[in-house]
Image: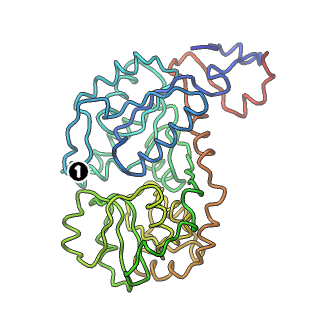
């Protein structure tokens, strides 16, 4: 690693960032959620890696696809590593400048354990409600789940969180020592009202009420699918709860996974996006809906309460039916306008700026401090 400096050198103002302007040359990104999974976490990380590599950072993604895997209990389409200890040898061989651990899974927990034992720096991020999901699937008390979450994040130099409301909640639960708001962006060209097509929902009575995302117990889709709404409910996505929900709600239209232009057209051609989950950390699909000119109806949860502006781009209510009836009346142009300026690049740069060097003897200043120092030839 280049540019080692001590505090005396910093005091003199003669300090070169070990990341040459806070850009690490080599980053190890550890995640239990990766391709071929289809969800918001994977989409976020894939776009992040593409950006970092375009800016000159070589990224090693330590994910289940590089390990022997088994199906996740109760969610067989997701496979997890059952040899997570191999992550350490992969990271050491790569010799990264920085390590970021993204998920509380076998790879994440094993890597954090190794980093803690060695006294090495790392950063983390909070993407899913691990404690709540664990309790929903196994007889594990919520308090025990949060004890694991606290252990996972407590030694991270920074823990990146997608919404301010969730950040405040994690502070109350004493999760992590330095929480950082990591605002998410959206590709407002890929998701755009111009992708509206008449053939997408041809023959279906309107209005079209759309849900996009995983079909799993924690998404509480029953709350949406059981509503006595006029028109047609459409679900784009898949998951372990689909077969049961299809049987129970035969009038719902199921489209499975959609990608690229077809996904964009499903958003832009609907009338209202419905977000029933109460356990979300953010909800990237909400931004995609807004960018497509689609108002959003949601229950109050971290993420939606930061994004949905009542009567402007949607509605929030404990009674989802009321939220739907208010949201569908919102102007599509206002929904679109609410995400203009929420660029992907801004979020990616914030992530990069908060990475820390693996070597605890190297001090990396924040951007404001670095800008105030004289240039070094």
Counting from the top left corner in percent of width and height, residue 178 is at 53, 38
Outermost residue, front side: 199
Query: Image check: 89 left or right of 179?
Result: left
Q: Is residue 77 above or below residue 322?
A: above
Residue found at x 37% / y 81% = 204
Res 202 quadrant in image:
bottom left
Q: Can you say which quadrant of the picture contains the C terminus?
A: top right
Foreground residue among 203 and 293: 203
Q: Along the horizontal axis of the image, is 61 left or right of 214?
A: right
> Residue 44 or 188: which is nearer the viewer?
188
Residue drawn where x is 26% and y is 38% of the image: 80
Image quarter of residue 28? top left
Image height of 143 relative to 176, above or below? below
Quarter of the picture containing the N terminus is top right
Q: Nearest the camera: 256 or 365?
A: 256
Residue 235 to residue 75: above or below: below
Residue 266 point in image, percent of width and height? 44, 67
Relative placement, left or right, of 245 versus 354 is left
State the image quarter where residue 349 is shown. Answer: top right
Question: SS class of the residue under badge 1?
Answer: strand
Reading the image, the residue beneath label 1 is 75
Taking the spot 42% from the left edge, 67% from the top edge, the residue there is: 275
Residue nearest the observer in this picture, 48 or 265: 265
Q: Residue furthest right?
A: 374
Query: In the displayed structure, does residue 101 sit left or right of residue 58?
Result: left
**Dot 1 crowding, Cα within 10 Å, few <14, some 14–19, many 20+:** few
- Residue at x 59%, y 57% (from the top left corner): 188
């Amino acid at each position: 690693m280049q540019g080692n400096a001590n505090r005396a050198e910093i005091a003199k103002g003669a300090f070169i960032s070990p990341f040459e302007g806070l850009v690490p040359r080599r980053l190890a990104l550890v995640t239990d959620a990766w391709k071929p999974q289809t969800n918001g976490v994977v989409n976020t990380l894939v776009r992040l890696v593409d950006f970092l590599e375009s800016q000159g950072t070589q990224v090693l993604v330590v994910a289940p696809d590089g390990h022997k895997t088994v199906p996740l209990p109760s969610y067989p389409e997701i496979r997890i590593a059952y040899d997570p200890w191999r992550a350490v040898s992969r990271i050491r061989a790569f010799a990264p400048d920085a390590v970021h651990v993204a998920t509380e899974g076998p790879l994440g927990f094993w890597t954090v354990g190794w980093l803690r034992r060695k006294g090495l720096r790392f950063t983390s991020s909070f993407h899913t409600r691990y404690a709540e999901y664990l309790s929903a699937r196994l007889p594990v008390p919520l308090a025990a789940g949060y004890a694991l979450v606290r252990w996972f994040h407590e030694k991270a130099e920074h823990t990146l969180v997608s919404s301010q409301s969730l950040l405040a909640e994690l502070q109350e639960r004493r999760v992590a020592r330095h929480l950082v708001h990591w605002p998410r962006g959206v590709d407002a060209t890929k998701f755009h009202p111009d992708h509206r097509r008449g053939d997408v929902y041809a023959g279906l009575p309107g209005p079209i009420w759309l849900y996009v995302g995983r079909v799993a117990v924690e998404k509480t889709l029953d709350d949406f699918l059981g509503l006595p709404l006029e028109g047609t409910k459409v679900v784009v996505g898949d998951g372990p709860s689909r077969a049961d929900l299809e049987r129970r709600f035969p009038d719902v239209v199921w489209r499975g996974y959609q990608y690229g232009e077809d996904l964009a057209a499903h958003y832009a051609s609907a009338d209202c996006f419905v977000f029933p989950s109460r356990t979300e950390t953010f909800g990237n699909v909400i931004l995609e809906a807004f960018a497509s000119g689609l108002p959003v109806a949601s229950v109050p949860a971290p993420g939606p309460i930061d994004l949905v502006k009542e009567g402007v781009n949607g509605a929030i209510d404990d009674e989802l039916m009321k939220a739907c009836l208010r949201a569908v009346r919102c102007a599509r142009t206002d929904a679109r306008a609410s995400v203009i300026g929420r660029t992907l690049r801004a979020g990616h740069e914030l992530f990069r700026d908060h990475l820390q060097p693996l070597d605890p003897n190297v001090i990396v200043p924040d951007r404001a401090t670095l800008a105030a120092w004289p240039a070094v030839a």
